[in-house]
Image: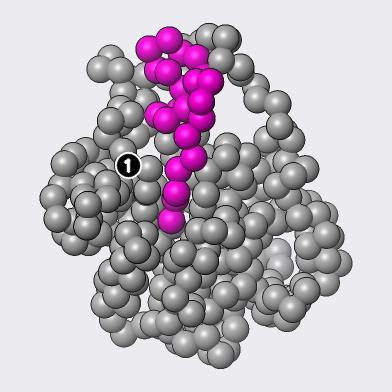
């Protein structure tokens, strides 16, 4: 894959934006502020629920919705980072995390030796299959992007599974005016490391919470039966297990940039049987403990 910038090309201030203190623009982080193992969450309030398990917290900062705590768990340096909601925020977070480890911010040049981060998304989601109970967990073998964000990047040929996309378009009769549904794999080594017998399948990533996920309040969705279509989709023995709003971009950008990524989500709702967890925070806390143990095993 040919990078847009080689290590001899200086990146302009308008493209690589830094704060006056030299930190990266949105995350307000410097390279020394993060570990190579990063747990990303959507909810800024969930960061403290992770870092309270650390043996020591070394660094804390918040800028906008981006909250970062870095510390040590069983001797390993781990960063917990809130991305906020949506693939547009994942675009910011992944590019800026990559810049912190793979661009010399003072020289504004890509480093000759690149670093690969381990990034685990620990999220919440709605199950689309009736046999996946609330308060269980789902690990994502694939992210299926209904959001369109990765379509803005070049050289996705080695990242997208176009056969899965073609099958999805055909089976669901995907509307032509909607974004091309791209499919990206999880990092296989990281998936094996994190998986504790969770439900596993394809995670659909939506660009919104209401109509894009088949919900109706005062506005009717263009595809009111989207959940049914997703529920019945099948590809090489896999099914779509759940809906959320970040995984496709996380998988696609990580693969393009050379990082390892996997998503594991607590199931807080089942869209098919209309169930919602009575105490999903307890479920999330249990999942946090499992992910921390798996990362440090």
Residue 259 placement, left or right of 32: right
- Name the residue nearer the viewer: 88 or 78: 78
Q: Residue 10 location, x and y as percent?
A: 53, 9
Q: Quadrant of residue 289?
A: bottom left
Q: Residue at x 21, y 47 (%)?
A: 71
Q: Residue at x 47, y 87 (%)?
A: 133
- SS of the residue at dot 1? loop
Residue 175 shows in this picture = no
Mark 1 Cα-neighbour bin, 10 Å: few <14, some 14–19, many ≥20: some
Q: Residue at x 53, y 79 (%)?
A: 199
Residue labelled with disc 1: 35
- Name the residue nearer the viewer: 199 or 275: 199
Q: Would residue 183 be counted in the magenta stretch?
A: no
Quarter occupied by the N terminus: top right
Establish if 13 lies above or below 101: above
Q: Residue 284 location, x and y as percent?
A: 32, 71
Q: Residue at x 68, y 35 (%)?
A: 153
The magenta region covers 99-120
Q: Quadrant of residue 275?
A: bottom left
Q: Residue 161 location, x and y as percent?
A: 76, 55
């Amino acid at each position: 894959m040919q990078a847009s910038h080689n290590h001899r090309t200086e990146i302009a201030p308008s493209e690589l934006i830094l704060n006056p203190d030299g930190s990266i623009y949105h995350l307000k982080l410097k390279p020394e502020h993060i570990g190579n193992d990063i747990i990303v969450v959507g909810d800024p309030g969930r960061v403290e629920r992770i870092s309270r398990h650390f043996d020591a917290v070394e660094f804390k900062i918040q800028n906008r919705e981006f909250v970062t705590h870095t510390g040590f768990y069983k001797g390993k340096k781990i960063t917990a980072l809130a991305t906020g909601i949506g693939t547009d925020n994942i675009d910011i977070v992944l590019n800026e995390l990559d810049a912190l480890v793979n661009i010399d911010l003072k020289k504004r040049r890509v480093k000759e030796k690149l670093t690969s981060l381990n990034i685990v998304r620990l999220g919440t989601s709605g199950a689309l299959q009736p046999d996946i109970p609330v308060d269980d967990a789902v690990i994502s073998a694939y992210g299926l992007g209904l959001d369109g964000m990765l379509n803005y990047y070049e050289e996705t040929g080695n990242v997208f599974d176009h056969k899965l996309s073609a099958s999805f378009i055909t089976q669901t009769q995907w509307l032509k005016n909607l974004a091309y549904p791209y499919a990206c794999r999880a990092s296989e080594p990281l998936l094996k490391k994190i998986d504790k017998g969770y439900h596993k399948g394809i995670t659909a990533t939506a660009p919104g919470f209401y109509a894009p996920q088949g919900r109706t309040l005062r506005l009717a969705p263009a595809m009111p039966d989207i959940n049914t279509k997703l529920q019945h989709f099948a590809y090489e023995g896999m099914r779509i297990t759940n809906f959320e709003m970040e995984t496709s971009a996380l998988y696609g950008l990580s693969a393009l940039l050379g990082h390892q990524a996997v998503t594991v989500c607590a199931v807080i709702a089942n869209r098919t049987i209309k169930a919602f967890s009575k105490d999903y925070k307890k479920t999330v806390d249990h999942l946090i403990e499992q992910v921390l143990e798996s990362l440090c095993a």
